Image (spheres, helix red, strand yellow):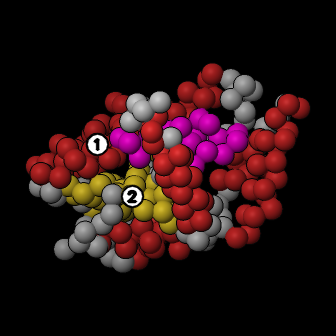
């Protein structure tokens, strides 16, 4: 029996690769995006019985609820949700305007919350389901210029950790996939129109240069997509997993630094001073 996958941000980048690979495997995709017309070639290839492409702004709660209902009405169930929609815009904390910061939190955190809340009643009734949050290794580290984006990703990790405990009795699984760099237009769009003020050239400016320098070592979106789909099909998926060789050393270094700091300050933590 074909499974039904609900994917946000499905029209481009990683979301597009996820959609293509899942359709090729024989499963059904509800592919949501701000511009679903970009998926017309897949509708022509696979037909409406296999793909439903719908416009969706994940920050719009009413629209999210309506689209989730449409998906269930059309296919009778939702087996997987992949919360993939999101974006970044680089700027120092001092330079970023309040609207840009809030917009990134809306897309990268509240979009995840909105879709997750809307699908939970369906998965509870089914007594099954798997919610996969496409986060980032940025949810474990801090990078100059990415405060808004990474704050949201850290929050997605915490939200999902609580979610997993709440929904486990209903047979619902939760996984946070945390890729490193991916060869999509994400890096380009994150830096578009960005002007780094002089005081932050040595931090945010250098980070932008490093991303450009090392982007050739990033993972192919098709490889990350294949790993995420595999996570959906294993019996005992992890709650959190780093994906991609560029992500692993950063995650390991962050974990090591935190453990060392905790050990260094253990006496004070125990109120012994």
Q: Magenta residues, as a range?
A: 138-159
Left or right side of 206 for 246: left
Give coordinates of residue 12: x percent, y percent: 57, 57
Rendered image: mark on residue 240: 2
Q: Residue at x 70, y 53 (%)?
A: 187
Q: Which residue is mark 1?
A: 162
Give coordinates of residue 27: x percent, y percent: 31, 71
Up the image or down, 82 lies above or below 154; here it is: below
Q: Indicate yes or no whether the magenta region holds residue 252.
A: no
Whether residue 191 is visible to the viewer of this picture, yes or no, is: yes
Dot 2 or dot 1: first in sequence order is: 1
Q: Helix, strand, or loop for circle 2?
A: strand
Q: Helix, strand, or loop for circle 1?
A: helix
Q: Residue at x 23, y 72 (%)?
A: 235
Q: CA distance from mark 2 to mark 1?
A: 12 Å
Q: Indicate yes or no whether the magenta region holds residue 152.
A: yes
């Amino acid at each position: 029996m074909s499974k039904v996958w609900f994917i946000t941000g499905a029209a481009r980048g990683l979301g597009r690769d996820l959609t293509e690979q899942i359709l090729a495997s024989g499963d059904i995709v509800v592919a949501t995006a701000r511009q679903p017309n970009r998926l017309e070639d897949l509708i022509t290839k696979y037909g409406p019985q296999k793909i439903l492409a719908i416009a969706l702004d994940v920050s719009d709660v009413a629209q999210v609820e309506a689209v989730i209902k449409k998906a269930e009405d059309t296919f009778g169930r939702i087996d997987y949700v992949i919360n993939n929609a999101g974006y970044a815009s680089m700027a120092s904390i001092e330079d970023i305007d309040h609207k840009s910061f809030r917009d990134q939190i809306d897309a990268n955190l509240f979009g995840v919350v909105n879709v997750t809340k809307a699908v939970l009643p369906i998965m509870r009734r089914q007594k099954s389901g798997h919610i996969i949050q496409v986060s980032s290794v940025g949810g474990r580290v801090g990078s100059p210029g990415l405060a808004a984006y990474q704050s949201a990703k850290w929050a997605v990790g915490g939200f999902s950790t609580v979610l997993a405990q709440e929904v486990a009795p209903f047979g619902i699984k939760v996984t946070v996939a945390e890729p490193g760099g991916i060869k999509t237009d994400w890096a380009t769009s994150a830096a578009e129109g960005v002007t780094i003020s002089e005081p932050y050239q040595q931090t945010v400016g250098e980070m932008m240069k490093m991303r450009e320098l090392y982007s050739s070592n990033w993972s192919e979106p098709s490889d990350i997509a294949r790993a995420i789909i595999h996570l959906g099909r294993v019996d005992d998926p992890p709650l959190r997993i780093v994906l991609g060789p560029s992500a692993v050393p950063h995650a390991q270094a962050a974990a090591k630094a935190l453990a060392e700091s905790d050990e260094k300050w253990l006496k004070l933590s125990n109120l012994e001073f």
